[in-house]
Image (tube, rainbow, N blue to C red):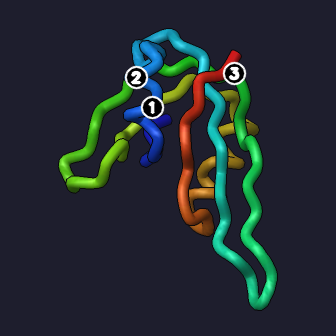
């Protein structure tokens, strides 16, 4: 499943950006009302199939294709509609 992510530059710097690497997908939500946003791991240790930098000029922005379970895919589809950002971190 392809998703738009930030943090791709960090993966490349750590030598983890290649296909087959395991990554964690971290979701940061927008604040609600007077409260704070939330950051949590939505999918841990998922295989990265491909990572393509975007051409929009944002540092570290990319499209990641991940091998997700159905449940993980549904969580990330929902997160894309309300999250401030989705970030990839080296995982395991």
Labelled pair 2, 1 in contact (Cβ < 8 Å): yes
Is the C terminus in the top left, top right, bottom left or bottom right quadrant?
Answer: top right
Labelled pair 3, 1 in contact (Cβ < 8 Å): no
Tell me the CA gap for discs 2 and 3: 19 Å
Residue at x 66%, y 22% (from the top left corner): 91
Q: Nearer the viewer, mark 3 or mark 1?
A: 1
Q: Position of residue 28 (x, y in %)?
A: 65, 58
Q: Position of residue 58 (x, y in %)?
A: 29, 54
The residue that disc 1 covers is 10
Near-viewer residue (48 or 36) = 36
The residue that disc 3 covers is 45
Mark 1, other Cα within 10 Å: few <14 / some 14–19 / many ≥20:
some
Near-viewer residue (75 or 90) = 90
Residue at x 45%, y 46% (from the top left corner): 6
Place residue 38 in its image quadrant: bottom right
The residue that disc 2 covers is 13
Secondary structure beneath dot 1 equals helix
Near-viewer residue (89 or 50) = 89
Q: Position of residue 18 (x, y in %)?
A: 40, 14
Q: Earlier in the sequence, mark 2 or mark 3?
A: 2
């Amino acid at each position: 499943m392809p998703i738009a992510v930030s943090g791709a530059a960090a993966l490349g710097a750590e030598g983890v950006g290649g296909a087959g690497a395991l990554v964690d997908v971290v979701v940061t939500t927008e604040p609600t009302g007077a409260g704070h946003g939330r950051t949590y791991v939505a999918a841990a240790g998922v295989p990265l199939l491909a990572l393509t930098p975007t051409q929009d000029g944002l540092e570290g922005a990319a499209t990641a294709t991940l091998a997700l379970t159905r449940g993980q895919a549904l969580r990330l589809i929902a997160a894309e509609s309300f999250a401030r950002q989705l970030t990839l971190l080296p995982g395991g």
